[in-house]
Image (cartoon, rainbow, N blue to C red):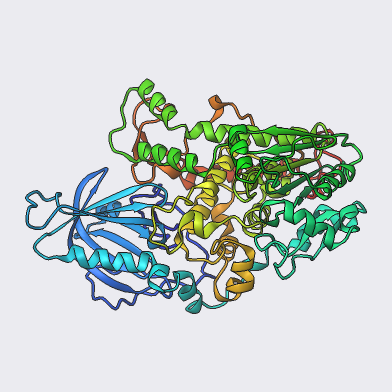
Amino acid sequence: MSSPFSTPHERQIHRTPQADDPPPTTRFPAMSTSCPVETAYELKLLRGEAVIREDKNVMYIGPFGRVKGRILVTTYRMTFVVNDNRTICEEYKLDIPLGQIAKIEKFGYASSSRKDDSYGFQILCKDYRTYRFASDPSTHSRRDICETLNIYAFPLSYKLKLFAFAYRDSMPKPSIDGWKVYSAMGELERMGVGQCKFWRIIDINKEYKFAETYPSLLAIPTASADEGNAFLKKIGEFRSRQRIPVLSWFDRKTLATITRSSQPLCGVTGRKNLDDEAHLRNIREANAHCSELQIYDARPNVNATVNKAKGGGYEENYELSKLTFLDIHNIHVVRESMKKFVQLLSSSGVGVDEKHVYKMIDETKWLMHIASILDASARIVHNIATNRQSVLVHCSDGWDRTAQLTSLAMIQLDRYYRTIEGFIVVIEKEWCSFGHKFAQRYGHGDENSSDSERSPVFPQFVECVWQIMQQFPTCFEFNSRFLIAILDEMYACRFGTFLYNSEKARIAENKCHETTISLWSYILENRQRFENPLYKKAKNHGVISVNPSYCRLEIWTEYYARSNPHVVTPHAESVQLLETRPSWSHLDFFDEIRNLENILYAGGEDSSDHDDDDDDDTN
């Protein structure tokens, strides 16, 4: 899968064709064209990228059929190009960032291969797409290509560095420092936490010694802070990995809050902790409108019970608290479901019978999992916006399903998070700083493709955002290209934004803010590429609430089916070609409509259409 930024002017077989894409701004330096390996094809390289291996005689076995060409392996990607200089051959160009590769498998034997496609190798990607190549058995080039791919796709397994560090070393300083877009203190102040007497910002974790997977700055009820650090440490001993309940989001009008944590360590004996109970009481009492704290355990009840037998548990019989299990499945179920779903969409020749396609998609259960997450997020939104009730969210350790739910609820509650900068803040806060294990979940630089800890939790969240965008197309400043860019770069390891498993590892130990470039630098320097022309800032106020009905969900073919542009979906009358999606000429038309609306409504709209604080991006 290609990074959308590697060769932005070229069309690539696995991406939605974007021939009319506006070019990125020139503030990001142009790519180098020097290649240590002499090639007939001029490959436009990134800074810090070098070609290290070439095979001039391979055949790509793809959804279009069989195409002969050559493979170039660089320190950043593997590229396939057709051995022909005709323009049409650009349709068959294929870029796969090495960070996207999960496994390289050989097939066939040189001594027994008879057919052109019976000897070669296939690349299994981390998003479950597969690319298959046939090699010439007489040259033994397959061995060299596969060895090179293994070394540079899994550098950490060979004591090498990820590409992000070489990329930073060769780049001038970006004009926008993406590492400074999010400030924990700045975000807490934006929400009004610093001005609220019921909440206090604390630095007990400033050296990551209290909870190493938590951010350095936390916000807790003032009543709990007044009890001192010894009180908090006792709570930490009762919560998995010391991830005590802390603030995620605050409504300055109603004082309703979203807090997050890990599971309590009750065990089979039902052990209690009076300090933990007092802390949750303080969270409830910090909201005068809240007579009962709603606790959402993201897990199925049976899973939580199994965890209890292993020393974990849930908040049973807490005073003035209501516990609800949300029945969201774990990382292992999600991994297998997405694998089936993507392979169904990526395979050539999905059945043309629409009823058959419905059945096949249903059997993957992917959209069912999406619906369950959206339903849970809608519940949280209802608690906060309608009932003015504070909510605590957790799963087992509080860095997977918990992050999904807090983020999605915040996006629906707070219009700021529906802007480009605001969405960046959501990711930095709820995912990066609160310890989503990006390195482990997506196997950055690691060749152990069978690691059971790998799972597409973050991509699942991003798809949920896309589903909400389909229901509220004018409420988001960004477009789907923005979401796809984030996912592509999360796998590619070109930027430091998603490296490592925690803020401590990323910032304190490995200094990624100094040694790598932030993805947000590129995004913000090229923000026009990622803007939604249908976005209406003046009308984008208040709360939105997704309809989580399974019937309302769509299939994100723009992302999942990029390796196969001929995809049958339940919404298609026949074969859906991705080329039929709106071109930039259509988007320019939408821009014209928006400009006309701005002119027509300049000088003031009907005040009845707006909240009293329509210009305040706080909530």
Residue 364: x and y, percent?
A: 43, 32
Q: Is residue 189 visible?
A: yes
Q: Is residue 471 visible?
A: no
Whether residue 602 sits left or right of residue 378 in the image: it is: right
Whether residue 383 sits left or right of residue 24 in the image: it is: right
Whether residue 94 sits left or right of residue 459 in the image: it is: left
Residue 543: x and y, percent?
A: 74, 37
Q: Residue furthest top?
A: 355
Residue at 58%, 64% in the rendered image: 525
Q: Nearer the viewer, residue 493 or 297?
A: 297
Residue at 60%, 73% in the rendered image: 509
Figure disc tally: 0
Q: Residue furthest front?
A: 269
**Quadrant assignment, res 304:** top right
Residue at 32%, 65% in the rendered image: 150
Please state, as top left, top right, bottom left or bottom right, where the N terminus lies in the image: bottom left
Above/below status of 379 relative to 483:
above
Q: Nearer the viewer, residue 41 or 228?
A: 228
Q: Nearer the viewer, residue 174 or 316?
A: 316
Residue 249: x and y, percent?
A: 76, 48
**Quadrant assignment, res 359:** top left
Above/below status of 143 relative to 397:
below
Residue 295: x and y, percent?
A: 74, 38
